[in-house]
Image: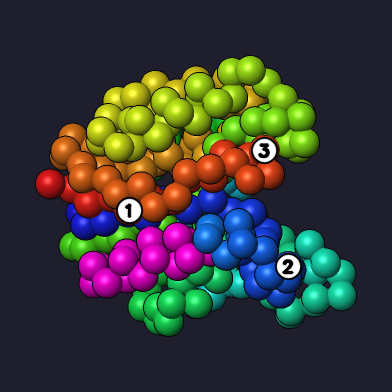
Amino acid sequence: MIIAASLCPWPPVLARELTGRDPVITELRKACAEATERLVGARPDLIVVVGPADETRRWDPGSRLDLSVFAPALGSGGNPALPPSLGLGALLLDQVGYRGPRILQGVSEYEGPAGCAELGAAIGGSAERVGLLVMGDGSARRSVQAPGYYDERAAAFDAETERALRHGDLGALLAISPALARELLATGRPAWQVMAGAMRPLPLAADILYSDAPFGVGYLVAFLTPQ
């Protein structure tokens, strides 16, 4: 069963090697570190990292991301084919010293809500005490400087996602339209819906640790526990 879940975004700047000092990134990194530490502190038997990928499949749990996919000069000897969302999730676990069993689970953006929920339910039965590290960004269309430019629907989309998390409204997460999420470049949708499938129907307590869009991309960090 799921004992806790942490939600984090996956901007490349989570890797300290890729950026210098930035007060916004420092705040985001601290929130992600706290969420991951709290997840590990819940003492799961297994942590499953869930993130968007080109296809729905598991990756070698020992895989690490090769940072040269972002900066050629930083070849780290990792797996360049590993989805960045999973690689950065693995990095967060490594940074807080987690050495226990892990699963790296990619989810395709074309996986529908029902398929995501089914996958989540299966993950929930993977061990007696399962922790989820859910990697996913909100809309990348929050400003004219955003990767996808500005879309007036983006802020409301991210606000509704945050509301659903704050109130443990898993039904609202499962109701997110895949088509709308793709239009708004919200990569977190399939991972959030996997989490919803894994944790329903239990009520949730949520602690939002960070919510902002510093680069025109909605970044949300949260820690959730079933009640």
SS label for mark 2: loop
Asked if the stretch drawn in magenta spans residue 14, the answer is: no
Mark 2 nearby-residue class (10 Å; few <14, some 14–19, many ≥20): few
The residue sitting at 41% across, 57% down in the picture is: 133
Along the horizontal axis of the image, is 213 left or right of 196? right
Identify the residue position indicated by label 1 in the image.
223
Mark 3 nearby-residue class (10 Å; few <14, some 14–19, many ≥20): many
Does 153 appear above or below 112?
A: above
Q: Are marks 3 and 2 in contact (CB under 8 Å)?
A: no
- For the N terminus, the quadrant is bottom left
The answer to whether residue 124 shows anywhere in this view is no
Does 144 appear above or below 77?
A: above
Kindly indicate the quadrant of the structure image that contains residue 46: bottom left
Task: Check residue 216 in the rendering and tell me which mark sits there, or answer none.
Answer: 3
Helix, strand or loop for the magenta stretch, by majority: helix
Front one among 67 and 38: 38
Q: Which comes sooner in the sequence, label 1 or label 2?
A: 2
SS label for mark 3: loop
Q: Residue 104 at x, y = what percent?
A: 49, 61
Along the horizontal axis of the image, is 156 left or right of 45? right
Type of amino acid at the residue the image marks with label 1? Phe
Identify the residue position indicated by label 2 in the image.
19
| Disc number lying in front (1 or 2) | 2
Type of amino acid at the residue the image marks with label 2? Thr
Asked if the stretch drawn in magenta spans residue 32, the answer is: yes
Instruction: Measure how far apart labels 1 and 2 are at the Cα level.
Output: 26 Å
Which stretch appears magenta?
29-48
Q: Residue 207 at x, y = what percent?
A: 29, 49
Instruction: Measure how far apart labels 3 and 2 are at the Cα level.
Output: 18 Å
Type of amino acid at the residue the image marks with label 3? Gly
Q: Residue 205 at x, y = what percent?
A: 21, 45
